[in-house]
Image: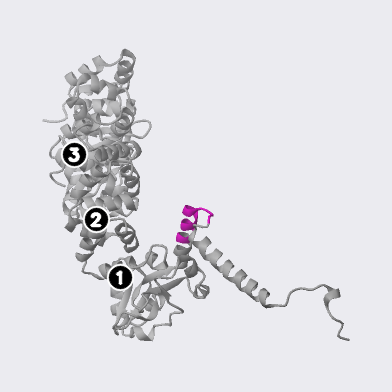
Amino acid sequence: MSAELTAAALLNERFFTDYPLEAARALEALPTTAIVAAMLARSPVARSRTWQALSADRAADVLEALSVDAAQQLLAIDTHAAIAALAHLALPKRETLLAALHVDVATELRAQMQYGPDTAGSLMDPRVGALSAQLTVGEAIERLRSLRQRGLRELFVVDDQMQLAGMVETEDLALSGRERPIREITRHIATVVRATDPVARVAQVLQAQPMSALPVVGDSGRFLGVIRQLSLLTATQRASGKRWFR
Amino acid sequence: MSEAKPSDTLAYAFLRAHPEDAARVLESCPPADVVALMQDLPARVTASVLQMLRPSLAAAVLHGVDLNRGAVLVALLETSMAARVLRQVTEKRRIALLARLRTSKGVALRLILAVPDDSIGAWVDADCLTLTGEVTAAAARARAAAASGNTERIVLLDAERRPLSWILLPDLLRAAPETPVSALAVPIPAMLVAAMPLSAGLLHMAWRTSSVLPVTTRLGTFIGLLRHERLQQIHDQDRASRGPTMSSFGGVIAYGYWQTITGVMRGGLSLLPPVRTLSEIPDER
């Protein structure tokens, strides 16, 4: 806190505590070191509220930048937020953090991150950055620049509760005015699958409505990740022992 | 803001999105900190927070920031708030800030600041649309659409800026584009003089016919419009802040009025012949 003016510190504290969603959107536009500094300068209550509202990819950046002790405090706050952020980390880092957690917390997180071999969750790529529906096009483009993935043709949009609100095509982002709210260019997604759905259902859905990335949601409707056509084909090929491609 | 510290970037996001909440937070901070924070923020965001701040703290900000920025901030404040804040800066600073406001707002502020804050002139809404000279309804509509302030009534002024009449917005919206505004004008029921005390202003008979009245200087120069509701609110606040004592301005007026009436009655009674018992009255039969 010492680096901040008292006025700025008090404003930020109130912002994080009373408007965590907006504070999270403002944080996501900053470099990771700045997010970490801002979060460490806040009270535990303020930090906890805003951490839960951070997008999973930026939350993962924060976990990577923090000490293990500080990271495990964040992971203990909320299971859903912890799982979403951990899913974006490379396996060694994820295991390091889980090992540092209290055994009960780590066991619960591990259990919730594992899906049966024949479920949609097992095919899912959780490392998908999602955009908040509150962003403008200009803010969304800034977020796009901060995403680790490259070559994305579509981006998924979530509401304040991290529920899937639709998708935005990068072409639409590029062609729209920067001040336009992205909800105006968000396209409806007709089909999603649950992480616990069987692979057969995933295959059925993708056959009926081919798409490059099928969104996966949890039982609460929270956006968890996507299944790409290629993952499904690879899994099916592995299961049947047949070669689908030459 | 591009080179701002991250903490300031976040604070800026909060100030921009929630100026009223931010103002309450800033009121608990050291004034020097508030000034330092507000020196570099975009002027519009700073002004929207100043608008919500306690006038004494807003005045501290106007003292602390450099003069040109202070003048920009005053120009962005609503006129009534700008006047309240300017009353709390030093005379030297006030003169310097007003000298940089060479706009109609600057003129209005000088007129408002010329009357004490317990008079109606201190509380007028000077951010209202006025027209001088003949224009068409289409031109007046364009002016109204571009105006940032109140356009409910558009006051027509003569060359000396004295109110002649006014136009009601619904009439203007219904008029054919080429209609001259003078054809839409309706008489103003009454005008209030800025120096009139709050209590006296509240009692004006014209409020029975209009909820809004123009306020002028003693020489008739238009300052702005005053709503009855606003006047009542200020009067009530004034009374509440002073308590039900004789120091209350309304109380002084009421007391003075009562003393005058009772004084006249006493004087009148003293001129009457003294009361005598029936036995003292000679029988004139």
Is residue B238 within the magenta segment?
yes
The numbered dot on residue B44 is: 2
| Discs 3 and 1 lie in a common subunit | yes
Judging from the image, mark 1 belongs to the subunit labelled: B
Work out which residue is located at the far left of the displayed protein and give it.
A246
Q: Is residue A119 above or below residue B137?
A: above
- The residue that disc 1 covers is B145
Q: Picture coordinates of residue B86 (x, y %)?
A: 29, 59
Sequence order check: which comes first, mark 2 or mark 3?
Answer: 3
Q: Disc 2, disc 3: CB below 8 Å?
A: no
Q: Picture coordinates of residue A156 (x, y %)?
A: 25, 41
Q: Residues within 10 Å of mark 1 (few under 14, many from 20)?
A: few
Q: Image quarter for residue A119?
A: top left
Quadrant for the N terminus of chain A in the image: top left
Q: Residues within 10 Å of mark 2 (few under 14, many from 20)?
A: some
Q: Amino acid at mark 2?
A: Arg
Q: Is residue B9 left or right of residue A104?
A: left
Which SS type dominates the magenta stretch?
helix
Gap in angstroms between the C-alphas marked 2 and 3: 20 Å
| Discs 2 and 3 lie in a common subunit | yes
- The residue that disc 3 covers is B6
> Is disc 2 placed on a helix, strand or loop?
helix
